[in-house]
Image (spheres, rainbow, N blue to C red):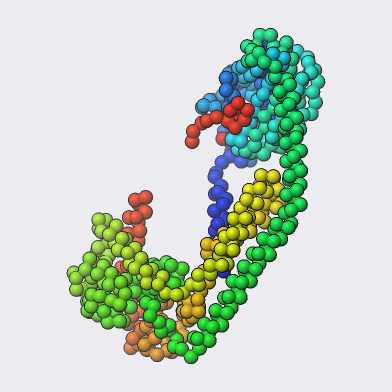
Amino acid sequence: MKKICLFVVLFVIALFPAPVLAVDFSIDETEITASLTSSGEVHVKETHTYSFDGEFNGITRTIIPKENTSIANMQASENGESLTVKQEDNVYSIHRGGADETVSIDLFYTIKNGVEVYDDVAQFYWPFFDKSNESVYQNMTITVQPPKPAEAKAAYGYDEAYNTLHHNDEEGVTFQLGEVSSGENGDIRVAYDAALFPEAPVTSDEAMLKTMLAEKEELDEAVIARAEKREQWSSLAPFGTGVLTALALILIWHGWRKRQETLREAERQTHGSGHFPNDSMSLPAMLMFMNHGHLSAKSLTAAFLELLRKGYVEKVSEKEFTVVQHSGDYEHETHLISWLFSKIGDGTNLHVEDITAYTKKKKNQPAYRKDFQAWQRAVKKEYTQYDLYQKSTNPRWTAGIAAAVTLPLVVLYLYYGLILWTLPFIALLLFFLIFAIGYCPLTVKGQQIKHVLGSLKIGDQWKSWGKEEQVPALLFQMGMGKRDLFTNPSLSNANENWALFLILGANLHMSLDQADRHASASAAAGTGSSGGGAGAGGGGGGSGAF
């Protein structure tokens, strides 16, 4: 269960991207005035009030024009003084440096062919921002003014601009959007009598007002239906979370109960047996089992000294060894002997300095890494053949089915904006997924080995054991990285068999660790565009700073 909890934490952290260093700012106020002209052009004035925390170089405004329209004559000023504007594709950078200030910058530009003229009405249908916008507008107001005083025939907004119409009189139409979050659309649509635009090119001879009013009615009906569905799903959320939470608790209880049963049986079978596991499993396989499938350079040191303990290798000196038998009890032992003695040594003898000299040559580093990985695979091949984990098919299938049920609920509640209910569903989804993938309880045999070896990770209790168990215990601690290899044994222990292995391990590990770093370094050494917007007619935009 500890591994599952750790996996949950890491998974949640991975969901959130690391922060990117950028200018710290907020857009406190945004006022946009679009003045329609009789020729169909739209003269726009935007006033953006920014509050900066720290140094800044200016602001940016992205304006993605709709199809068959264009942006012209972009200018910027502050308190009547002109500012430099640089354009790159649809992004306009307004240069105005400073630090820790609140500034109000005016933008002026013209939308060519911004008004679409039909038989009965002319419409201004425009997205001043879209989903590509990465900033929050704290308080946005959009005003549309006709060429002459006249009341709009129709005026409404979509998405963030829906139901924000503040007033509609002869002076113009005002939308008060208030706060607009990043990544949102918010088109506005306003129609005036076509006679107000005599100089504008005709878009179509067909009537448009009836279509606009029908679309507004459909929009209202869709919003009402969505609100009703939202309320319906909100009322069902307590039942859904309750049932799934109960199922999660049952799975947790089942896992805990099975673990307790296995632990009791493992303790019963372990009682009266020797200190170190008397099992057919090799020392490297035990290390892989206790280290969550990972083998390090220290594990390799312990594996080599295990060959010495078993008599396949003999000590010539504290830094030199000779091979006695080229084949071991396991495939990984045979590979280890062949790798170290035949590829690195002279076929019979191996000096610890041979390992360092071998991996200092860059041409040998990939081969060393490849052989190390082959040794790991061979150990894994042995390790996976033992009955250490229960299959637990039914609980995992149950969790998998529960995850399949929970996923659409997460999507559904996100769609309806029910964030407070979405969060528990996400937590339940993560639990069921991780349980289905990662729940592999230990068998009695697995618990036995874990119980005995777990107590050996630290401490010197093994020094009071029989001599035949002392060295394997020391090598296990060495392979797990729990034994300081560079602490010399005291003189009182100088005649102990394990003290010799500690001295040999220190000499050997120094070379193997350096070789691993050389090979790892060699392996490590080998290793924005513009487009259309999401608003009406492929338009859109947003704001930022630099």
Q: Is residue 317 above or below residue 220?
A: below
In-front residue for pair 246/490: 246
The percent position of residue 330, horizontal first and vertical second, equals 31, 74
On-image quarter of the C terminus:
top right
In this rendering, the count of numbered labels is 0
| Residue 100 shows in the view | no
Residue shown at 50% from the left, 86% from the top: 269
Residue shown at 43% from the left, 67% from the top: 293
Q: In terms of image quadrants, where is residue 137?
A: top right
Residue shown at 34% from the left, 63% from the top: 373
The percent position of residue 544, horizontal first and vertical second, equals 60, 34
The percent position of residue 255, horizontal first and vertical second, equals 59, 71
Q: Is residue 467 above or below residue 133?
A: below
Q: Classify residue 104 as left or right of residue 93.
A: right
The percent position of residue 507, horizontal first and vertical second, equals 31, 73
On-image quarter of the N terminus:
bottom right
| Residue 246 shows in the view | yes
Residue shown at 65% from the left, 64% from the top: 247
